[in-house]
Image: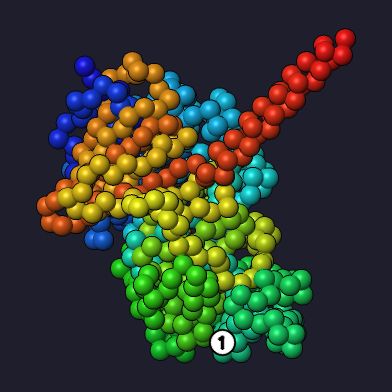
């Protein structure tokens, strides 16, 4: 008898030996998927999907792609592993047939008619910096989608979280006033584009913060005077005419000793292999969970100059090179994460990461990209709050798992690590659906229980072999038990994407409150009868 699916989605490092796994158990629920976008990719990419520290060649049946999104968004839906070549049976179509796989709380929170996951999951190997960008909030996303659906493909917001699989660099949020003032003093090219009035306002805000004792990386948060000055300065640079911006970047590169290297343009379609360099971030051991976020921020003029020179080589004459002076340079070691709410500027610079986000494809770009730029929208929509972004360390969930929980309902990310040769490692059932991604080791997983009926369908599996690159989808309520192979001594490492636990906590509170009201009403009715 064919096993019942817990839905597993799989993105193998090479094509699977069989279209679907046959499991000996008949009580589990699992579905295997092969995740690949249906549209052809550009010939050269700067960010390749990475399931190993050094990304392997893609499966022979699939061409290279900038990223393989794991989820249900129309721009790159996950495909069932049973027939990856046809790319017709998707996770979205499965959920349209089996919406109960999402679980009642998820369907209630994100829409009863939803046949999709509220989150997207992927792994990136960033070799050339990604664009200076932000993601709109829901209100702005709705307006952008209505006015320009070609570039803004849906009406959803896109908060996201990036978790470092190795040393990882990113630009995240705005620097504080003293740091920007120092950059303006040290960089005449930057100051010239900012303009005298805006530069003076930044310096005045920095002086006021210093006098009040509020300066520093975790200081002002963007007090109103600085926020206004910051907006004026950033907008002046990003909106500068192309010729002035190009001349400023050329002059900066020449002053820093790099000159101008025309070379191959990077970003969103090209790679020069740039990356690395600069001080190393704190290691997971040297930076415990209590470390302040500022321990991961490198905003000195020397750090920014070095980064600007790298970016100028990747993106010659691009105004986005100058944007790095406005944004926090964050360096994360393996196992640390940063989350990004709507309307916060950022750019991933280098390294390998797991990324999770709300289900959306909306990106407002303004630099370091040959793609569509919407500078006016980006500059007008940013919050202009300043200070170091919050850096998360995983919280212990149980002996073999930790969880990264950002302040967004749509998702949280977990990590399960099973020592080599160990078996019977159980993970508590999740009330919502899961995506599993294996980044290390080999082993297996067994799924039991869950919300799907006992006689599910032939696409579902109860057990699955796991190896680096495996991707699985698990319906709500399934209990998972992992085992790790003993060969090679490498532990089994599995990353999970799930709906944020606070959604289920709120649902439980509302259910308890409703039960309390019902009980009180029944008691009042009995008292009325007794009085009569």
Viewer-nearest residue: 276 or 416: 416
Q: How many marks are shown on the rendered structure?
A: 1
Q: Position of residue 248 (x, y in %)?
A: 54, 80
Compared to residue 135, the image places residue 504 above or below, namely above
Q: Position of residue 110 (x, y in %)?
A: 58, 34
Name the image quarter holding residue 527. top right
Compared to residue 82, the image places residue 405 above or below, namely below
Does residue 486 appear left or right of residue 90 in this picture? left
Q: Position of residue 303 (x, y in %)?
A: 46, 82
Name the image quarter holding residue 191. bottom right
Q: In which quarter of the image is the C terminus?
A: top right
Which residue of the protein is positioned furthest toward the front in this rendering? Answer: 530
Does residue 392 appear left or right of residue 55 in this picture? right
Residue in view at x 47 percent, y 87 percent: 302
Callout 1: SS: loop
Residue in view at x 12 percent, y 56 percent: 488
Does residue 332 appear left or right of residue 192 in this picture? left
Residue in view at x 68 percent, y 45 percent: 139
Viewer-nearest residue: 478 or 51: 478
Residue 16 can be seen in this image: yes
Name the image quarter holding residue 55. bottom left
Compared to residue 33, the image places residue 321 above or below, namely below
Residue 62 can be seen in this image: no
Residue pointed to by mark 1: 187
Q: Position of residue 448 (x, y in %)?
A: 32, 29
- The local crowd at label 1, few if under 14, some if 14 to 19, many if 20 or more residues have their Cα within 10 Å, is some
Viewer-nearest residue: 513 or 171: 513
Looking at the picture, the colour scheme in use is rainbow
Viewer-nearest residue: 175 or 373: 175
Residue in view at x 52 percent, y 71 percent: 293
Q: Quadrant of the N terminus?
A: top left
């Amino acid at each position: 008898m064919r096993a019942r699916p817990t839905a597993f989605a799989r993105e193998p490092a090479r094509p699977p030996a069989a279209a679907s796994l046959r499991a000996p158990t008949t009580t589990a629920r699992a579905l295997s998927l092969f995740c690949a976008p249906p549209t052809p990719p550009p010939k050269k990419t700067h960010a390749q999907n990475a399931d190993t520290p050094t990304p392997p060649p893609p499966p022979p049946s699939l061409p290279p792609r900038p990223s393989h999104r794991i989820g249900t968004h129309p721009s790159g839906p996950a495909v069932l592993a049973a027939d990856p070549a046809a790319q017709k049976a998707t996770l979205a179509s499965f959920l349209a047939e089996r919406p109960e796989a999402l679980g009642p709380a998820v369907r209630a929170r994100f829409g009863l008619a939803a046949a999709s996951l509220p989150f997207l999951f992927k792994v990136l190997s960033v070799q050339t910096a990604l664009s200076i960008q932000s993601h709109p909030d829901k209100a702005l996303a709705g307006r952008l989608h209505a006015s320009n659906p070609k570039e803004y493909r849906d009406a959803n917001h896109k908060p996201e979280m990036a978790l470092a699989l190795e040393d990882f660099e990113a630009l995240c949020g705005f620097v504080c006033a003293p740091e920007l003032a120092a950059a303006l003093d040290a960089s005449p090219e930057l100051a010239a584009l900012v303009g005298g009035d805006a530069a003076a306002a930044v310096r005045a805000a920095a002086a006021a913060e210093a006098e009040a004792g509020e300066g520093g990386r975790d200081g002002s948060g963007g007090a109103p005077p600085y926020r206004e000055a910051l907006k004026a300065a950033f907008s002046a640079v990003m909106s500068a005419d192309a010729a002035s911006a190009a001349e400023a970047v050329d002059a900066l590169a020449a002053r820093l000793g790099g000159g101008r290297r025309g070379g191959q343009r990077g970003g969103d379609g090209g790679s020069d292999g740039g990356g690395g360099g600069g001080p190393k971030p704190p290691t997971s051991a040297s930076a415990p969970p209590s470390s302040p976020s500022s321990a991961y921020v490198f905003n000195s003029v020397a750090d920014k100059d070095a980064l600007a020179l790298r970016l100028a080589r990747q993106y010659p004459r691009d105004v986005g090179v100058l944007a790095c002076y406005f944004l926090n340079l964050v360096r994360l070691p393996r196992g640390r994460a940063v989350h990004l709410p709507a309307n916060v500027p950022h750019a991933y610079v280098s390294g390998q990461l797991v990324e999770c986000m709300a289900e959306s494809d909306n990106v407002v770009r303004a630099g370091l990209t040959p793609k569509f730029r919407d500078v006016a929208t980006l500059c007008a929509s940013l919050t202009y709050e300043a200070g170091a972004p919050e850096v998360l360390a995983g919280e212990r969930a149980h002996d073999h798992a930790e969880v990264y929980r950002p302040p967004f309902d749509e998702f949280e990310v977990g990590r399960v690590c099973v020592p080599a040769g160990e078996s019977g490692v159980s993970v508590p059932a999740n009330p919502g659906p899961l995506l599993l991604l294996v980044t290390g080791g080999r082993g297996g997983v067994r799924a039991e229980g869950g919300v799907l009926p006992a006689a599910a369908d032939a696409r579902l599996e109860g057990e699955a072999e796991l190896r680096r690159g495996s991707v699985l989808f698990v319906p709500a309520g399934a209990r998972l038990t992992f085992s790790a192979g003993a060969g090679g001594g490498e532990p089994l490492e599995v990353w999970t994407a799930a709906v944020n636990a606070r959604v289920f906590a709120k649902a439980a509170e509302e259910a308890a409150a409703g039960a309390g009201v019902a009980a009180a009403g029944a008691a009042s009715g009995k008292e009325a009868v007794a009085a009569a």
